[in-house]
């Protein structure tokens, strides 16, 4: 059967790239005063309509932004007519003069405004036909009605670095991007049509910053991008680790909307005149006062100050070490008293100390009148002031000091890499003619701060080099990289097949493979579907886990489920292993985690495709282990406010049936038949009525567990809880007594509430999966393996000997393996080549073991003790 074209088109459409939403312009329309690489970047911005300019210091971001906004305004006016479009560049106050200077060179009128009335007056009364400038505070405080804007550009867009956690970010997303953001979630609006971001230092140390830029530009929502490219830290949502197999795709995607330009040669131009000056970095450590080392949590006094300090203790250390650092500052100044210098600091106390120690130093600070601050910065930039003291957050972005200064002294160091690197590049810039000297002073107790800063600096350089290589190879945008990304999707032509005496497995896309199976050839389908966007198993776009959201996942399932119905024998069943998913509070706009009812979505999906829902089996999970993974069920949080806490989420096995050909009596065309000798009345009653009789034995008391190790406690509790009437208070008392005796492990549930109900399978051997073998051999572990005994019960209950049992998501081939062991024929399809190879090996090893039944029986007999294995391993 040929591959369905519509499905392959669906898979190909998963390749992401930022669409073009701007105007096509000719190179001749760009102001000829722009230099070398700059017209190319202007053209790219205008044609994209929503783009980020990550150009190195000194490459002309100011002029590029001004010219791009001019062309946008002219194109919109030519298209729509009417009054002149309002295009706004949002800038730090310290760079107003720089923008005005560059605008004058380009012949572009600019007007600095703080309110909507000032914009309306300039456009209506004065007939202004230029670009508006404003400061970040005016937008954040709602002084400007952004609905009247056609285009906006954020220069040094530091507000977006505080993704989700700052008022500035939320206001900018709501007012400029039209997105009312609640954590990862977004209520979409129209937003300003043309949006740009310009900064030299997107942080490689915080991926979420790049995601925030993409969200502002309307390229991809933050939550969607997190799912697509990253592993998440369940404890800290914004600490992201990129999937190794997604790294290339991530940076190619970034290149589709963000231009990382380090030098003109990245775009094929000469670097003549654009060589950065050498950087001479010197570190200076001053002694710490160890008499104030403090104490440990247990009250034990420290002999030495620890160097593993955090943000709060770092600020305290700065205050205590200030006299020694100022002394080192004066020592360094004495090497060249007449040099022009920047003196960077973080605290107001440091500024006061600098002003007291350095005669004639000029300072800029937050409480200073804006005009005075601007004049001071301008005077230092023009060489009229010899030494300037400032915080990087005030003067570290946008200011150009390289004409008269080549020396910066940092009176202290901090964790904020962006502020640090911005401050360095106020003097190390293109057109700097001197060797740049950077002196950094820190205390003995701040060694760890220095190490963190150096690590971030290294990663910054690595990211810049990587992006330069991508642009050199593929050019701006994703056009040149489409073929690279397309090769990560499959059309079924590379499918492989392996088979044994009574099993057959394919390495292929499951949609393409299932479509090739004969109609009504499968007696039972047992599978664990991918849990929507929760995991990705391969770098291929065919991977069902490579989905944007639940809707996208089920649209791909829409191609598979009709084929499953087709290949299943009439009247036979489909079993689907699923689990609900924890949903971060931000997705709902609330401060607590909720639950995404994935199992309910699956029920509706299969019903839509012609399956009849027959019920579900509940499989309990370890609530302690789940809490360690999600931090949703914490004991401490329960004690603070029990209303926040939910319950542990079990796994479910959903049961569906294909209608028989003859619906008059409801029997399957090929019934699943049980001989009453092998399937006695007692077993039937247990299955049908799901009721266990109690032996009447008493509940165990705390004294019954004295002297037992964890293995013995677990076994004895299991035996007791499945044969006695349950008593909640007694259960808690036993657990509490073990906790008081320091015998209750924090990492797993030693006393889980074992169930006597057969539809709640709490005795599942959690460690008895093919993952155990994978882990033992040091191989990659399957993320959601099916447990052996779940599969065994289903196969025995709902198939005949000799039936074909099929798993469309084969993984490590648990289903075909257990089918073979139960006298059936096992089929499976698997996309991941590693899982497929390991699954084939396991199946062949099982074939070989058939000649040694006593050994196989011995291995299988270990099932009864397998739960104890988990206790020992944990």
Image (spheres, rainbow, N blue to C red):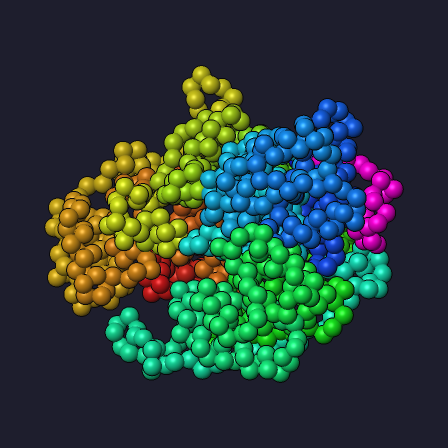
Q: Is residue 469 left or right of residue 563?
A: right
Report the side of 670 relative to 128 (left or right): left
Is residue 31 magenta-colored? yes
Establish if 800 lies above or below 346.
above
Give the residue displayed 37% in from the left and 38% down from the top: 617
Residue located 54% across and 42% down the image: 138
Question: Residue 874: x and y, percent?
Answer: 35, 63
Tell me which segment is drawn in magenta. 17-40
Q: Position of residue 555 (x, y in %)?
A: 58, 33
Q: Residue at x 49, y 24 (%)?
A: 660
Most extreme residue toward the right is 28
Tell me if 337 is positioned left or right of 271 in this view: left
Quadrant of res 78: top right
Quadrant in which residue 453 is drawn = bottom right
Q: Quadrant of the N terminus?
A: top right
Q: Main secondary structure of the magenta part?
A: loop
Q: Is residue 163 visible?
A: yes
Q: Is residue 252 above or below residue 190?
A: below
Q: Position of residue 443 (x, y in %)?
A: 47, 77
Q: Nearer the viewer, residue 436 or 842?
A: 436
Report x, y in % for residue 763. Answer: 32, 50
């Amino acid at each position: 059967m040929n591959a369905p074209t519509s499905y392959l088109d669906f898979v190909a459409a998963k390749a992401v790239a930022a669409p073009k939403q701007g105007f096509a312009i000719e190179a001749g329309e760009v102001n000829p005063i722009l230099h070398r690489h700059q017209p190319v970047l202007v053209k790219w911005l205008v044609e994209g309509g929503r783009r980020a300019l990550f150009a190195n210091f000194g490459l002309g971001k100011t002029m590029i932004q001004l010219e791009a906004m001019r062309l946008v305004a002219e194109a919109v006016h030519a298209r729509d007519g009417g009054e002149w479009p309002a295009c706004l560049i949002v800038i730090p106050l310290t760079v107003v003069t720089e923008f005005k200077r560059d605008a004058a060179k380009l012949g572009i009128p600019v007007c600095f405004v703080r309110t909507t009335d000032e914009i309306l007056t300039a456009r209506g009364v004065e007939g202004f036909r230029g670009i508006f400038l404003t400061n970040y505070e005016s937008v954040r405080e709602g002084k400007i009605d952004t609905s009247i804007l056609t285009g906006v550009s954020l220069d040094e867009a530091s507000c977006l670095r505080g993704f989700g956690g700052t008022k500035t970010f939320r206001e900018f997303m709501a007012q400029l991007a039209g997105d009312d953001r609640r954590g990862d979630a977004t209520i979409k609006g129209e937003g300003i049509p043309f949006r740009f971001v310009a900064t030299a230092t997107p942080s490689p140390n915080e991926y979420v910053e790049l995601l925030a830029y993409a969200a502002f530009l309307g390229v991809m929502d933050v939550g969607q991008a997190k799912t697509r490219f990253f592993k998440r830290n369940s404890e800290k949502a914004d600490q992201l680790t990129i999937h190794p197999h997604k790294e290339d795709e991530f940076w190619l995607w970034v290149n589709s909307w963000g231009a990382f330009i380090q030098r003109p040669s990245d775009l094929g131009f000469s670097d003549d005149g654009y060589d950065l000056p050498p950087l001479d970095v010197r570190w200076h450590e001053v002694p710490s006062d160890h008499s104030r080392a403090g104490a440990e949590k247990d009250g034990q006094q420290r002999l030495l100050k620890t160097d593993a300090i955090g943000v709060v203790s770092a600020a305290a250390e700065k205050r205590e070490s200030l006299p020694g650092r100022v002394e080192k500052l004066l020592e360094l100044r004495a090497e060249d008293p007449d040099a022009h210098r920047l003196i960077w600091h973080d605290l107001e106390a440091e500024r006061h100390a600098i002003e007291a120690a350095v005669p004639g130093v000029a300072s800029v600070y937050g409480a200073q009148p804006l005009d005075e601050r601007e004049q001071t910065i301008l005077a230092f930039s023009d060489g009229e002031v010899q030494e300037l003291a400032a915080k990087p957050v005030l003067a570290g972005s946008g200011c150009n000091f390289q004409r008269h200064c080549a020396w910066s002294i940092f009176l202290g160091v901090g964790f904020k890499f962006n502020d640090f690197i911005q401050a360095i590049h106020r003097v190390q810039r293109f057109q700097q003619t001197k060797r740049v000297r950077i002196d950094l002073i820190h205390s003995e107790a701040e060694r760890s701060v220095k190490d963190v800063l150096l690590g971030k600096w290294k990663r910054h350089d690595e990211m810049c080099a990587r992006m330069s290589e991508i642009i050199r190879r593929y050019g701006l945008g994703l056009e040149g990289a489409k073929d690279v990304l397309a090769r990560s999707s499959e059309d079924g032509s590379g499918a492989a097949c392996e088979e044994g005496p009574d099993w057959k497995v394919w390495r292929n896309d499951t949609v393409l493979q299932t479509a090739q199976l004969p109609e009504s050839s499968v007696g039972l389908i047992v599978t664990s579907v991918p849990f929507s966007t929760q995991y990705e198993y391969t770098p291929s776009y065919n991977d069902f886990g490579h989905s944007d959201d639940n809707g996208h996942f089920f649209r791909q399932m829409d191609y598979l489920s009709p084929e499953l119905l087709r290949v299943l024998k009439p009247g036979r069943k489909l079993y689907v292993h699923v689990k609900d998913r924890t949903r971060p509070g931000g997705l709902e706009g609330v401060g607590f985690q909720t639950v995404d009812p994935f199992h309910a979505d699956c029920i509706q999906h299969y019903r839509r495709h012609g399956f009849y829902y027959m019920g579900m089996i509940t499989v309990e999970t370890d609530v302690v282990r789940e809490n360690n993974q999600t931090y949703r069920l914490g004991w401490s949080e329960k004690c603070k406010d029990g209303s926040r806490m939910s319950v542990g989420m079990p796994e479910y096995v959903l049961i569906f049936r294909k209608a028989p050909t003859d619906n008059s009596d409801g029997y399957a065309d090929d019934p699943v038949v049980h001989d009453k000798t092998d399937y006695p009345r007692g077993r039937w009653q247990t299955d049908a009525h799901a009721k266990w009789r109690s032996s009447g034995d008493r509940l165990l008391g705390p004294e019954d567990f004295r002297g037992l190790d964890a293995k013995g406690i677990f076994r004895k509790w299991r035996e007791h809880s499945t044969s006695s009437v349950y008593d909640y208070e007694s259960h808690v008392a036993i657990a509490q007594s073990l906790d008081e005796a320091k015998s209750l492990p924090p990492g797993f549930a030693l006393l889980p509430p074992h169930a006597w109900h057969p539809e709640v399978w709490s005795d599942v051997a959690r460690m008895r999966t093919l993952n155990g073998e994978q882990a033992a051999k040091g191989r990659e572990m399957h993320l959601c393996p099916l447990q052996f005994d779940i599969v065994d019960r289903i196969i025995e209950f709902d198939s005949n000997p000799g039936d074909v049992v099929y798993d469309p998501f084969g993984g490590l081939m648990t289903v075909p393996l257990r089918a073979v062991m139960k006298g059936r024929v096992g089929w499976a399809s698997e996309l991941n080549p590693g899982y497929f190879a390991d699954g084939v090996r396991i199946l062949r090893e099982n074939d070989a073991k058939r000649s040694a039944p006593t050994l196989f029986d011995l291995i299988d007999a270990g099932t009864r003790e397998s739960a104890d294995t988990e206790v020992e391993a944990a």
